[in-house]
Image (tube, rainbow, N blue to C red):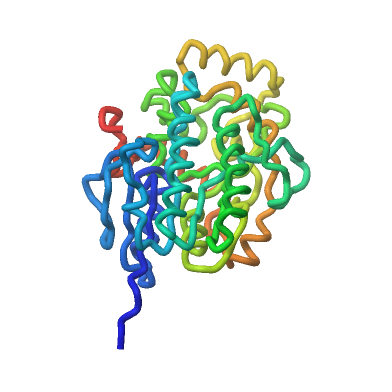
Amino acid sequence: MSSAPERRVVVTGATGNVGTSVVRILSEDPQIDVVHCIARRTPRDAPPKTTWTAADIADEECDLAADFAGASAVVHLAWAFQPTHHPPQTWRTNVLGSLRVFEATARAGVPALVHASSVGAYSPGPKDHKVDESWPTHGWPDAAYCREKAYLERVLDGYEREHPDMRVVRMRPAFLFKEEAASEQRRIFGGPATPAPVGKLARPGLLPFLPDVPGLRFQVLHTEDAARAYRLAVLGDARGAFNLAAEPPVDMPFLARLLKARTVRMPAAAARAALGTGWRLRLVRASPHLFDAVLGLPLMDCGRAREELGWRPESTAAEAVGALLSGLRKASGAHTPPLSSTPKTA
């Protein structure tokens, strides 16, 4: 009697916020034999059942198809958020690198591709009710992150038609937080204006006020919950797009309650002007273009993920934000280069 074929899953971007959780959850699953991880820099410690390749997915010299050969699924998570001041550089990794991943997945004959899209791929939408996966995915063209996520949605539209036998899944999660990613997210979005000690301000009662910007309402999700959805997509037979978010939606009064701070009404134009000045002076890394995008993001309905994946978040939005705040207070990190709490190794 012949033994069952080995179930091998490839994960790109395996050392980041989402990647570390996905790799851990997949490696702990008895149905998966090997998790092959691809990242630009490999970690000091690795979970059991993992193998590693150090590679830049956008490098033409990198033979991704060789890494993908024999895989039952490719989970594509690799993504660069910075530098926002130089969009061609993020385009190289995020778009051109993704195109190489898609092409290599098909060339290697992998039966399933699970791609990390985002709420950021959606066109501006409502804040007073939720939209499903049929909402247009044209992004916000002025923000590189949204522009790149939306572009890849169009690429996958054609890709699915060209490869009808491949199962293509598009995950569209809300903003993803976990304690171990706090230092990375502070560096990605904060920059020099938010050094590590500012994490102390994440303690309840220390912030005097939070700006309450009209329309600033969005969704979040604990990274571990997103990783569980990826696992279900890898092991199941689902196809198409899935919204992923926790309840309830987040706004400034919500955050103020968590931080025991009061809110002060601030026009969106004033908040954007302050952020824009900090971004132009390179004091903060979050761009005003991304701020505009967040103001327009629709709220997502996650009914399809519940019904077709059997997925439900285990953490509330308050718990997801709480994990981030706890990580900021502790300057938390993990044993991978992107998540390191030490900037020299990040």
**Image location of residue 277, percent across then percent down:** 55, 12
**Image location of residue 87, percent across then percent down:** 50, 23
Please name whichever residue, 100 or 193, is drawn nearer the observer in this view of the structure: 100
> Above or below — where is 143 with respect to 109?
above
Query: In the visual, does 199 lie left or right of 308?
Result: left
**Image location of residue 251, percent across then percent down:** 65, 37
The residue at 38%/23% (across/down) is: 195
The residue at 42%/22% (across/down) is: 191
- The image quarter in which residue 16 lies: top left
**Image location of residue 38, percent across then percent down:** 33, 47
The residue at 27%/51% (across/down) is: 52
Please name whichever residue, 73 or 202, is drawn nearer the observer in this view of the structure: 73
The number of discs equals 0
Q: Which quadrant is home to the N terminus? A: bottom left
The residue at 48%/24% (across/down) is: 88
> Above or below — where is 90 with respect to 15?
above
